[in-house]
Image: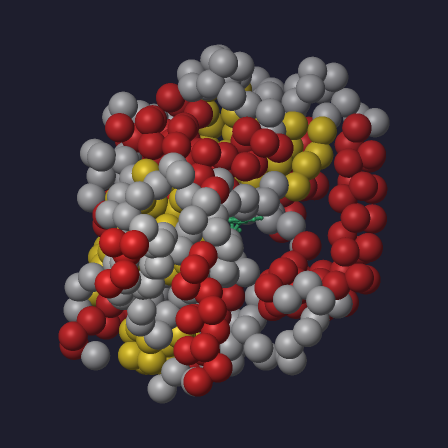
Amino acid sequence: MASVSHLVYRKWLFHLSKSRSVSRHSSQSRLFSTSSRCRTIMPAWVIDKYGSNDVLRFTKNASFPVINYPNEVIVKVVAAGLNPLDVSMRGGYGAATLSMKRDPLNITQSGSEFPLILGRDVSGVIMECGLDVKYFSERDEVWAAIPPWKQGSFAEFVVLSANEVSHKPKSLSHTEAAAIPYVATTAWSALVNTGGLSKDNCAKKRILILGGSGGVGTFAIQMLKAWGAHVTVTCSQNAEQFVRALGTDHVVDYTAGPVEEPLSTLEKFDLILDNVGGGTERWALNLLKPWSGAKYVTLVTPFLQNTDRLGIADGMMQTAATVATKALKHLAKGVHYRWGFFAPSGPALDEIREMVDAGQIRAVVEETFSFSQVPQALEKVEKGHARGKTVVEISKGGDDL
Ligand SMILES: NC(=O)c1ccc[n+]([C@@H]2O[C@H](COP(=O)([O-])OP(=O)(O)OC[C@H]3O[C@@H](n4cnc5c(N)ncnc54)[C@H](OP(=O)(O)O)[C@@H]3O)[C@@H](O)[C@H]2O)c1
Protein backbone atom coordinates (compact mmCIF):
# COMPACT_ATOMS: atom_id res chain seq x y z
CA MET A 1 0.00 0.00 0.00
CA ALA A 2 1.22 3.51 -0.76
CA SER A 3 1.89 5.51 2.40
CA VAL A 4 -0.22 8.55 3.30
CA SER A 5 2.84 10.79 3.01
CA HIS A 6 3.46 9.51 -0.49
CA LEU A 7 -0.10 10.30 -1.52
CA VAL A 8 0.18 13.82 -0.07
CA TYR A 9 3.51 14.28 -1.85
CA ARG A 10 2.03 13.21 -5.17
CA LYS A 11 -0.85 15.61 -4.69
CA TRP A 12 1.59 18.42 -3.99
CA LEU A 13 3.55 17.58 -7.14
CA PHE A 14 0.66 17.29 -9.56
CA HIS A 15 0.86 20.95 -10.55
CA LEU A 16 4.24 20.29 -12.20
CA SER A 17 2.70 18.14 -14.90
CA LYS A 18 0.47 19.03 -17.82
CA SER A 19 -2.82 17.27 -17.65
CA ARG A 20 -5.91 16.97 -19.79
CA SER A 21 -8.62 16.92 -17.19
CA VAL A 22 -10.05 20.24 -16.16
CA SER A 23 -12.29 21.11 -13.22
CA ARG A 24 -16.04 21.57 -13.64
CA HIS A 25 -15.59 25.31 -13.11
CA SER A 26 -13.27 25.73 -16.08
CA SER A 27 -15.98 27.64 -17.95
CA GLN A 28 -15.09 30.52 -15.65
CA SER A 29 -11.70 30.55 -17.45
CA ARG A 30 -9.47 29.47 -14.53
CA LEU A 31 -8.00 26.15 -15.66
CA PHE A 32 -7.41 24.01 -12.66
CA SER A 33 -5.70 20.87 -13.81
CA THR A 34 -5.62 17.59 -11.97
CA SER A 35 -4.23 14.30 -13.08
CA SER A 36 -6.99 11.95 -14.15
CA ARG A 37 -4.44 9.18 -14.02
CA CYS A 38 -3.36 9.73 -10.45
CA ARG A 39 -1.88 6.32 -9.74
CA THR A 40 0.36 5.60 -6.84
CA ILE A 41 1.57 2.07 -7.52
CA MET A 42 2.73 -0.01 -10.47
CA PRO A 43 4.16 -3.47 -11.20
CA ALA A 44 7.97 -3.74 -11.19
CA TRP A 45 10.89 -6.06 -10.51
CA VAL A 46 12.81 -4.63 -7.56
CA ILE A 47 15.75 -5.58 -5.35
CA ASP A 48 15.76 -4.88 -1.60
CA LYS A 49 19.45 -5.69 -1.10
CA TYR A 50 22.46 -6.46 -3.30
CA GLY A 51 23.23 -10.04 -4.25
CA SER A 52 22.70 -12.73 -6.86
CA ASN A 53 19.56 -13.30 -8.91
CA ASP A 54 17.51 -14.45 -5.92
CA VAL A 55 17.34 -10.87 -4.60
CA LEU A 56 14.95 -10.01 -7.47
CA ARG A 57 11.38 -9.59 -6.28
CA PHE A 58 8.28 -8.91 -8.33
CA THR A 59 5.78 -6.49 -6.82
CA LYS A 60 2.56 -4.90 -7.99
CA ASN A 61 3.07 -2.14 -5.39
CA ALA A 62 6.21 -0.33 -6.53
CA SER A 63 5.98 3.46 -6.19
CA PHE A 64 4.59 5.05 -9.30
CA PRO A 65 7.15 7.59 -10.64
CA VAL A 66 6.32 11.24 -10.08
CA ILE A 67 7.32 14.34 -12.01
CA ASN A 68 9.58 16.22 -9.59
CA TYR A 69 10.90 18.79 -12.07
CA PRO A 70 8.97 20.56 -14.85
CA ASN A 71 11.32 19.22 -17.54
CA GLU A 72 10.55 15.57 -16.75
CA VAL A 73 8.39 13.06 -18.59
CA ILE A 74 6.80 9.80 -17.48
CA VAL A 75 7.31 7.01 -20.01
CA LYS A 76 5.18 3.86 -20.19
CA VAL A 77 7.73 1.13 -20.77
CA VAL A 78 7.05 -1.20 -23.71
CA ALA A 79 10.48 -2.86 -23.87
CA ALA A 80 13.61 -2.80 -21.68
CA GLY A 81 17.08 -3.75 -22.92
CA LEU A 82 19.57 -5.48 -20.63
CA ASN A 83 23.27 -4.73 -20.18
CA PRO A 84 26.10 -6.29 -18.14
CA LEU A 85 25.73 -3.23 -15.88
CA ASP A 86 22.36 -4.56 -14.65
CA VAL A 87 24.09 -7.69 -13.37
CA SER A 88 26.87 -5.61 -11.76
CA MET A 89 24.42 -3.20 -10.14
CA ARG A 90 22.37 -6.10 -8.78
CA GLY A 91 25.55 -7.15 -6.97
CA GLY A 92 26.21 -3.65 -5.55
CA TYR A 93 28.68 -2.31 -8.13
CA GLY A 94 28.94 1.48 -7.90
CA ALA A 95 26.65 1.63 -4.87
CA ALA A 96 28.63 4.38 -3.07
CA THR A 97 28.85 6.73 -6.04
CA LEU A 98 25.32 6.13 -7.24
CA SER A 99 23.92 6.73 -3.75
CA MET A 100 25.80 10.02 -3.64
CA LYS A 101 24.32 11.01 -7.00
CA ARG A 102 20.81 10.18 -5.74
CA ASP A 103 21.27 11.99 -2.44
CA PRO A 104 24.22 14.44 -2.66
CA LEU A 105 23.58 15.96 0.79
CA ASN A 106 23.42 12.53 2.40
CA ILE A 107 20.08 13.33 4.01
CA THR A 108 18.58 9.86 3.84
CA GLN A 109 19.87 6.78 5.63
CA SER A 110 22.16 4.28 3.95
CA GLY A 111 20.19 1.64 2.05
CA SER A 112 17.56 4.20 1.06
CA GLU A 113 18.08 3.32 -2.61
CA PHE A 114 15.93 0.22 -2.01
CA PRO A 115 13.63 -0.97 -3.40
CA LEU A 116 15.82 -0.44 -6.46
CA ILE A 117 14.62 -1.01 -10.03
CA LEU A 118 17.24 -2.16 -12.55
CA GLY A 119 17.10 -1.70 -16.35
CA ARG A 120 19.04 0.99 -18.25
CA ASP A 121 17.35 0.87 -21.67
CA VAL A 122 13.79 1.83 -22.43
CA SER A 123 11.58 2.10 -25.46
CA GLY A 124 8.04 3.21 -24.78
CA VAL A 125 5.37 5.88 -24.98
CA ILE A 126 5.19 9.22 -23.18
CA MET A 127 2.32 9.20 -20.73
CA GLU A 128 2.75 12.57 -19.05
CA CYS A 129 4.90 15.68 -19.62
CA GLY A 130 6.14 18.28 -17.13
CA LEU A 131 5.08 21.88 -17.70
CA ASP A 132 8.36 22.96 -19.32
CA VAL A 133 8.49 20.07 -21.78
CA LYS A 134 8.05 21.48 -25.29
CA TYR A 135 9.80 18.93 -27.50
CA PHE A 136 7.59 15.96 -26.55
CA SER A 137 3.86 15.34 -26.23
CA GLU A 138 1.80 12.63 -24.64
CA ARG A 139 1.69 9.43 -26.73
CA ASP A 140 5.01 10.17 -28.49
CA GLU A 141 7.03 6.99 -29.02
CA VAL A 142 10.44 7.44 -27.42
CA TRP A 143 13.65 5.66 -26.48
CA ALA A 144 16.24 6.50 -23.82
CA ALA A 145 19.22 5.32 -21.83
CA ILE A 146 18.45 5.64 -18.12
CA PRO A 147 21.28 6.94 -15.88
CA PRO A 148 22.30 4.31 -13.29
CA TRP A 149 21.34 6.61 -10.38
CA LYS A 150 17.69 6.65 -11.51
CA GLN A 151 15.01 3.99 -11.15
CA GLY A 152 15.13 1.69 -14.18
CA SER A 153 12.91 0.16 -16.82
CA PHE A 154 12.04 -3.26 -15.34
CA ALA A 155 8.75 -1.59 -14.42
CA GLU A 156 5.60 -0.41 -16.09
CA PHE A 157 6.62 3.28 -15.94
CA VAL A 158 9.80 5.32 -15.55
CA VAL A 159 10.40 9.05 -15.06
CA LEU A 160 13.20 10.75 -16.99
CA SER A 161 14.46 14.21 -17.82
CA ALA A 162 13.30 15.23 -21.31
CA ASN A 163 17.00 15.87 -22.11
CA GLU A 164 17.62 12.14 -21.75
CA VAL A 165 14.79 11.11 -24.08
CA SER A 166 14.56 11.02 -27.87
CA HIS A 167 11.91 10.07 -30.42
CA LYS A 168 12.24 6.38 -31.28
CA PRO A 169 13.40 5.42 -34.81
CA LYS A 170 10.34 4.79 -36.95
CA SER A 171 12.00 1.82 -38.63
CA LEU A 172 12.37 -0.14 -35.37
CA SER A 173 9.87 -1.92 -33.17
CA HIS A 174 9.99 -1.09 -29.45
CA THR A 175 11.77 -4.40 -28.85
CA GLU A 176 14.49 -3.54 -31.36
CA ALA A 177 14.76 0.06 -30.17
CA ALA A 178 15.31 -1.05 -26.55
CA ALA A 179 18.50 -2.85 -27.64
CA ILE A 180 20.34 0.34 -28.57
CA PRO A 181 20.28 3.41 -26.25
CA TYR A 182 22.67 2.46 -23.40
CA VAL A 183 25.43 0.97 -25.56
CA ALA A 184 24.93 3.67 -28.19
CA THR A 185 25.22 6.61 -25.78
CA THR A 186 28.23 4.94 -24.14
CA ALA A 187 29.97 4.46 -27.50
CA TRP A 188 28.98 8.00 -28.53
CA SER A 189 30.35 9.48 -25.33
CA ALA A 190 33.64 7.53 -25.68
CA LEU A 191 34.18 8.06 -29.42
CA VAL A 192 32.67 11.51 -29.98
CA ASN A 193 32.92 13.40 -26.66
CA THR A 194 36.16 11.81 -25.43
CA GLY A 195 37.74 10.55 -28.66
CA GLY A 196 36.89 13.65 -30.73
CA LEU A 197 35.50 11.67 -33.67
CA SER A 198 32.61 12.90 -35.81
CA LYS A 199 31.01 12.03 -39.13
CA ASP A 200 33.12 14.78 -40.72
CA ASN A 201 36.57 13.68 -39.52
CA CYS A 202 36.33 9.88 -39.51
CA ALA A 203 36.88 9.02 -43.18
CA LYS A 204 39.78 6.59 -43.58
CA LYS A 205 40.82 6.88 -39.92
CA ARG A 206 42.12 3.58 -38.59
CA ILE A 207 40.19 2.52 -35.50
CA LEU A 208 40.83 -0.53 -33.31
CA ILE A 209 38.05 -1.85 -31.09
CA LEU A 210 39.25 -4.23 -28.38
CA GLY A 211 36.26 -6.45 -27.52
CA GLY A 212 34.15 -5.66 -30.58
CA SER A 213 31.56 -8.43 -30.34
CA GLY A 214 29.76 -7.14 -27.22
CA GLY A 215 27.02 -4.53 -26.91
CA VAL A 216 29.19 -1.39 -27.08
CA GLY A 217 31.47 -2.84 -29.80
CA THR A 218 28.55 -3.95 -31.96
CA PHE A 219 27.17 -0.41 -32.01
CA ALA A 220 30.60 1.26 -32.37
CA ILE A 221 31.50 -0.82 -35.43
CA GLN A 222 28.33 0.22 -37.25
CA MET A 223 28.64 3.91 -36.37
CA LEU A 224 32.31 4.10 -37.39
CA LYS A 225 31.69 2.28 -40.66
CA ALA A 226 28.79 4.66 -41.42
CA TRP A 227 31.27 7.53 -40.90
CA GLY A 228 33.83 6.00 -43.28
CA ALA A 229 36.46 4.71 -40.83
CA HIS A 230 38.58 1.58 -41.31
CA VAL A 231 37.67 -0.72 -38.38
CA THR A 232 39.76 -3.51 -36.86
CA VAL A 233 38.19 -5.60 -34.10
CA THR A 234 39.38 -8.17 -31.57
CA CYS A 235 36.89 -10.84 -30.56
CA SER A 236 36.72 -14.61 -30.15
CA GLN A 237 36.89 -16.72 -33.28
CA ASN A 238 33.24 -17.70 -33.13
CA ALA A 239 32.21 -14.02 -33.30
CA GLU A 240 34.18 -13.33 -36.49
CA GLN A 241 31.25 -13.81 -38.88
CA PHE A 242 29.04 -11.70 -36.64
CA VAL A 243 31.36 -8.66 -36.54
CA ARG A 244 32.19 -8.93 -40.25
CA ALA A 245 28.46 -8.83 -41.05
CA LEU A 246 28.35 -5.49 -39.22
CA GLY A 247 31.03 -4.08 -41.53
CA THR A 248 34.32 -4.80 -39.71
CA ASP A 249 37.30 -4.62 -42.09
CA HIS A 250 39.79 -6.72 -40.14
CA VAL A 251 39.28 -9.25 -37.33
CA VAL A 252 41.84 -10.57 -34.85
CA ASP A 253 40.93 -13.59 -32.72
CA TYR A 254 41.96 -13.04 -29.10
CA THR A 255 41.53 -16.72 -28.24
CA ALA A 256 44.28 -17.80 -30.67
CA GLY A 257 47.17 -16.46 -28.56
CA PRO A 258 48.53 -13.12 -27.35
CA VAL A 259 46.51 -10.68 -29.44
CA GLU A 260 49.13 -7.92 -29.31
CA GLU A 261 51.42 -9.91 -31.62
CA PRO A 262 49.21 -9.93 -34.75
CA LEU A 263 48.03 -6.39 -33.94
CA SER A 264 51.61 -5.06 -33.81
CA THR A 265 52.21 -6.15 -37.43
CA LEU A 266 49.37 -3.89 -38.66
CA GLU A 267 49.56 -0.24 -39.69
CA LYS A 268 49.23 1.94 -36.58
CA PHE A 269 45.86 3.29 -35.41
CA ASP A 270 44.33 6.75 -34.95
CA LEU A 271 42.07 5.66 -32.10
CA ILE A 272 41.62 2.60 -29.89
CA LEU A 273 38.36 1.91 -28.04
CA ASP A 274 39.06 -0.56 -25.23
CA ASN A 275 36.04 -2.59 -23.99
CA VAL A 276 38.24 -5.26 -22.40
CA GLY A 277 40.68 -3.61 -19.94
CA GLY A 278 42.84 -5.68 -17.61
CA GLY A 279 46.30 -6.03 -19.14
CA THR A 280 45.47 -4.31 -22.45
CA GLU A 281 46.94 -0.98 -21.33
CA ARG A 282 50.41 -2.52 -21.13
CA TRP A 283 50.63 -2.87 -24.93
CA ALA A 284 47.68 -1.16 -26.61
CA LEU A 285 49.07 2.37 -26.58
CA ASN A 286 52.12 1.20 -28.59
CA LEU A 287 49.70 0.50 -31.46
CA LEU A 288 48.79 4.20 -31.85
CA LYS A 289 50.40 6.61 -34.35
CA PRO A 290 52.63 8.76 -32.13
CA TRP A 291 52.64 12.59 -32.28
CA SER A 292 49.53 12.67 -34.46
CA GLY A 293 46.78 13.29 -31.88
CA ALA A 294 46.00 9.55 -31.68
CA LYS A 295 43.93 8.50 -28.65
CA TYR A 296 43.37 5.44 -26.51
CA VAL A 297 39.93 5.54 -24.82
CA THR A 298 39.11 2.84 -22.29
CA LEU A 299 35.64 2.11 -20.94
CA VAL A 300 37.06 -0.18 -18.28
CA THR A 301 38.06 2.17 -15.48
CA PRO A 302 38.50 1.70 -11.72
CA PHE A 303 36.41 4.79 -10.91
CA LEU A 304 33.40 3.09 -9.30
CA GLN A 305 35.50 0.35 -7.66
CA ASN A 306 37.67 3.06 -6.07
CA THR A 307 34.70 4.92 -4.61
CA ASP A 308 33.03 1.68 -3.47
CA ARG A 309 36.26 0.58 -1.77
CA LEU A 310 37.67 3.85 -0.43
CA GLY A 311 34.57 6.05 -0.06
CA ILE A 312 33.67 9.04 -2.20
CA ALA A 313 36.42 11.52 -1.24
CA ASP A 314 39.39 9.14 -1.14
CA GLY A 315 38.08 7.17 -4.12
CA MET A 316 37.84 10.30 -6.25
CA MET A 317 41.31 11.44 -5.19
CA GLN A 318 42.74 8.04 -6.04
CA THR A 319 40.94 8.10 -9.40
CA ALA A 320 42.17 11.58 -10.30
CA ALA A 321 45.75 10.67 -9.36
CA THR A 322 45.65 7.46 -11.40
CA VAL A 323 44.25 8.99 -14.58
CA ALA A 324 46.52 12.06 -14.40
CA THR A 325 49.65 9.92 -13.94
CA LYS A 326 48.75 7.67 -16.85
CA ALA A 327 47.76 10.54 -19.14
CA LEU A 328 51.07 12.35 -18.48
CA LYS A 329 53.14 9.18 -18.94
CA HIS A 330 51.60 8.49 -22.35
CA LEU A 331 51.60 12.13 -23.43
CA ALA A 332 55.39 12.04 -23.12
CA LYS A 333 55.33 9.27 -25.75
CA GLY A 334 53.09 11.30 -28.08
CA VAL A 335 49.74 9.56 -27.54
CA HIS A 336 46.64 10.48 -25.55
CA TYR A 337 45.27 8.30 -22.75
CA ARG A 338 41.60 8.83 -21.80
CA TRP A 339 38.79 7.26 -19.75
CA GLY A 340 35.36 7.02 -21.34
CA PHE A 341 32.05 6.99 -19.49
CA PHE A 342 28.41 6.44 -20.29
CA ALA A 343 26.57 9.75 -20.59
CA PRO A 344 22.78 9.93 -21.02
CA SER A 345 21.91 12.13 -24.01
CA GLY A 346 18.66 12.70 -25.88
CA PRO A 347 20.44 14.82 -28.54
CA ALA A 348 22.95 12.00 -29.24
CA LEU A 349 20.02 9.58 -29.60
CA ASP A 350 18.39 12.02 -32.05
CA GLU A 351 21.47 11.73 -34.30
CA ILE A 352 21.60 7.97 -33.83
CA ARG A 353 17.90 7.72 -34.77
CA GLU A 354 18.70 9.32 -38.13
CA MET A 355 21.45 6.78 -38.76
CA VAL A 356 19.09 3.94 -37.81
CA ASP A 357 16.27 5.20 -40.03
CA ALA A 358 18.79 5.65 -42.87
CA GLY A 359 19.64 1.95 -42.57
CA GLN A 360 23.23 2.60 -41.36
CA ILE A 361 22.74 1.00 -37.95
CA ARG A 362 20.64 -2.00 -37.12
CA ALA A 363 19.40 -3.35 -33.83
CA VAL A 364 20.92 -6.71 -32.94
CA VAL A 365 18.50 -8.54 -30.63
CA GLU A 366 19.56 -12.05 -29.70
CA GLU A 367 16.72 -13.08 -27.40
CA THR A 368 13.53 -11.64 -25.98
CA PHE A 369 11.82 -12.40 -22.67
CA SER A 370 8.44 -11.41 -21.22
CA PHE A 371 7.96 -9.22 -18.12
CA SER A 372 7.52 -12.33 -15.97
CA GLN A 373 10.96 -13.58 -17.09
CA VAL A 374 13.23 -10.74 -15.92
CA PRO A 375 15.29 -13.12 -13.69
CA GLN A 376 15.90 -15.48 -16.65
CA ALA A 377 16.89 -12.52 -18.84
CA LEU A 378 19.43 -11.33 -16.25
CA GLU A 379 20.79 -14.87 -15.93
CA LYS A 380 21.32 -14.95 -19.68
CA VAL A 381 23.27 -11.67 -19.63
CA GLU A 382 25.32 -12.89 -16.67
CA LYS A 383 26.48 -15.91 -18.69
CA GLY A 384 27.98 -13.53 -21.31
CA HIS A 385 29.18 -14.28 -24.85
CA ALA A 386 25.91 -13.09 -26.40
CA ARG A 387 25.93 -12.12 -30.08
CA GLY A 388 23.30 -9.45 -29.67
CA LYS A 389 21.19 -7.89 -26.98
CA THR A 390 18.71 -9.41 -24.55
CA VAL A 391 15.43 -7.51 -24.34
CA VAL A 392 12.47 -7.83 -21.96
CA GLU A 393 9.08 -7.04 -23.47
CA ILE A 394 7.55 -5.33 -20.45
CA SER A 395 4.15 -5.05 -22.09
CA LYS A 396 3.95 -8.85 -22.38
CA GLY A 397 3.55 -11.51 -19.72
CA GLY A 398 2.78 -9.25 -16.75
CA ASP A 399 -0.45 -11.15 -16.08
CA ASP A 400 1.51 -14.36 -15.47
CA LEU A 401 2.85 -12.93 -12.22
N1 LIG B 1 32.71 3.34 -18.27
C1 LIG B 1 31.42 3.24 -18.56
O1 LIG B 1 30.61 4.16 -18.30
C2 LIG B 1 30.93 2.00 -19.23
C3 LIG B 1 29.66 1.95 -19.80
C4 LIG B 1 29.27 0.80 -20.47
C5 LIG B 1 30.14 -0.27 -20.54
N2 LIG B 1 31.34 -0.20 -19.93
C6 LIG B 1 32.27 -1.33 -19.98
O2 LIG B 1 32.58 -1.55 -21.34
C7 LIG B 1 32.83 -2.92 -21.55
C8 LIG B 1 32.02 -3.41 -22.74
O3 LIG B 1 30.64 -3.35 -22.43
P1 LIG B 1 29.63 -4.25 -23.26
O4 LIG B 1 28.28 -3.87 -22.83
O5 LIG B 1 29.98 -4.18 -24.70
O6 LIG B 1 30.02 -5.70 -22.69
P2 LIG B 1 29.68 -7.13 -23.31
O7 LIG B 1 28.44 -7.05 -24.13
O8 LIG B 1 29.76 -8.11 -22.20
O9 LIG B 1 30.87 -7.40 -24.33
C9 LIG B 1 32.17 -7.66 -23.96
C10 LIG B 1 32.81 -8.39 -25.11
O10 LIG B 1 34.19 -8.49 -24.86
C11 LIG B 1 34.64 -9.66 -25.49
N3 LIG B 1 35.89 -10.06 -24.82
C12 LIG B 1 36.07 -10.59 -23.61
N4 LIG B 1 37.39 -10.75 -23.36
C13 LIG B 1 38.03 -10.30 -24.46
C14 LIG B 1 39.39 -10.17 -24.83
N5 LIG B 1 40.39 -10.55 -24.01
N6 LIG B 1 39.70 -9.64 -26.04
C15 LIG B 1 38.72 -9.26 -26.89
N7 LIG B 1 37.40 -9.34 -26.60
C16 LIG B 1 37.07 -9.85 -25.39
C17 LIG B 1 33.55 -10.68 -25.39
O11 LIG B 1 33.62 -11.31 -26.64
P3 LIG B 1 33.44 -12.88 -26.88
O12 LIG B 1 32.03 -13.21 -26.48
O13 LIG B 1 33.69 -12.99 -28.34
O14 LIG B 1 34.44 -13.59 -26.02
C18 LIG B 1 32.30 -9.83 -25.25
O15 LIG B 1 31.51 -9.89 -26.42
C19 LIG B 1 32.50 -3.65 -20.25
O16 LIG B 1 33.70 -3.88 -19.56
C20 LIG B 1 31.68 -2.63 -19.49
O17 LIG B 1 31.81 -2.77 -18.11
C21 LIG B 1 31.76 0.89 -19.29
Relative to the observer, which residue lies in front, 39 or 109?
A: 39
Question: Residue at coordinates 54% horizontally, 46% vertically from top-left?
Answer: 342
Question: Residue at coordinates 44% horizontally, 85% vertically from top-left?
Answer: 4
How many numbered circles does the render carry? 0
Question: Residue at coordinates 42% horizontally, 43% vertically from top-left?
Answer: 133
> x, y percentage for residue 288?
65, 24
Relative to the observer, which residue lies in front, 331 or 28?
A: 28
- The residue most toward the front is 28
Q: Is residue 93 above or below residue 384?
A: below
Residue 287 seen by the camera? no
Question: Residue at coordinates 46% horizontally, 65% vertically from top-left?
Answer: 13
> x, y percentage for residue 151?
45, 64
> x, y percentage for residue 400?
16, 77
Q: Is residue 75 above or below residue 355?
A: below
Q: How is the image coloured?
A: secondary structure
The quadrant the C terminus occupies is: bottom left
Residue 10 seen by the camera? yes
